[in-house]
Image: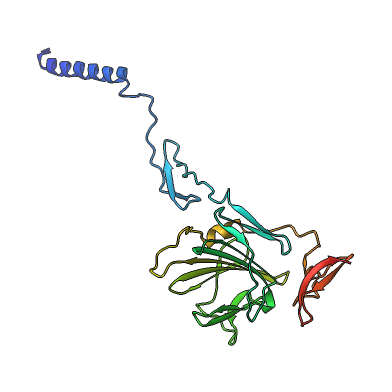
Amino acid sequence: MNYKGFAPILIVLIIAAAIGGYLVYSGKINLNQPKQIACTADAKICPDGSVVGRMGPNCEFAACPQVSDETSNWKTYTNKEYGFEFKYPNVFVQNTFNTPKGDVTPLTAESFHINKANIVTVNVYQLNKYKLIDNSGGFIFIYDSTNKKWVHDKTKEVSEFAPQKIESLVEAYLYKSGDSKCNSESLLIPKNNSGYLIEIINTKCMDDEGNQLEGYYELTTDQMLSTFKFLDTTNPEGRFCGGIGANLPENQCPEGYRCKLDGDYPDAGGKCIKK
């Protein structure tokens, strides 16, 4: 048998084996490397709104970016009388607020501000007396508590310009208004079973040239609403009573307390005080 024809093939095999041995020895080829798996194209939405996919040998979702809670060190505004609280930035200063005069007077009113650049106003109204008056737009809206929607004051019809419901842990609506100098976003939070409405107005103003004023802070209604919560109102002292649903158990004071009304008009509301 003639082996001369196999000599070149044998030499090639020896060289290939030597190269392969070197690559394995040097770690450039891992014989124990797991077989590559094709991951599905699933996606996961992270708390910050970003999207991550599956990766790695086990096709696990990639880690979401860490999101710091910007509101963790904010101040907390607490209204014990009407049982709610929310947070606002440390740079805002709370001040005394003169009760505005108009068709409807709030049960309570307070405000926070940074110079004239930002003003946050907090009002609490009797729900069945509240009117959202937008002078710049020429609209007046009232809240239909039965159907949980906002309608025109006169026609009782729903409009595309009415306050829009926001997806949140509490029932809340957003209304935007303003002029060439100041713009406002109003959070409207009705407390149907207690007969009052919380209005939080976030106003941002500019100078005559349209520039942001000194101390401007980009505070959003989403940030405030994310920190808003109703408090435990098991203590009857100062709890709302009376109102349009005065005959309902939740609007009546328990034994040992009486309802001190804020007026003698029909459907007047008030608060529980000890007898």
* Picture residue at 40% right of the left edge, 64% below the top: 211
Question: Can you give x and y, in whole percent of width and height, for residue 198 in the image?
Answer: 64, 68
Q: Is residue 256 left or right of residue 163?
A: right
Against 234, residue 146 (above or below) is: below
Q: Is residue 66 left or right of residue 156?
A: left
State how many labels appear.
0
Q: Is residue 40 visible?
A: yes
Question: Can you give x and y, in whole percent of width and height, for residue 275 in the image?
Answer: 89, 67
* Picture residue at 39% right of the left edge, 38% below the top: 37
Q: Please state which of residues 258 and 17 is positioned toward the viewer in this rendering.
A: 258
Against 186, residue 14 (above or below) is: above
Examine the image and state in which quarter residue 248 appears.
bottom right
Against 204, residue 153 (above or below) is: below
Q: Is residue 242 visible?
A: no
* Picture residue at 15% right of the left edge, 19% below the top: 9
Q: Please state which of residues 274 and 241 is positioned toward the viewer in this rendering.
A: 274
Q: Tell me the quadrant of the picture where the N terminus can be found.
A: top left
Examine the image and state in which quarter residue 33 appears.
top left
* Picture residue at 68% right of the left edge, 79% below the top: 129
Against 19, residue 179 (above or below) is: below
Q: Please state which of residues 171 and 72 is positioned toward the viewer in this rendering.
A: 72
Question: Can you give x and y, in whole percent of width and height, for residue 182 in the image?
Answer: 47, 70
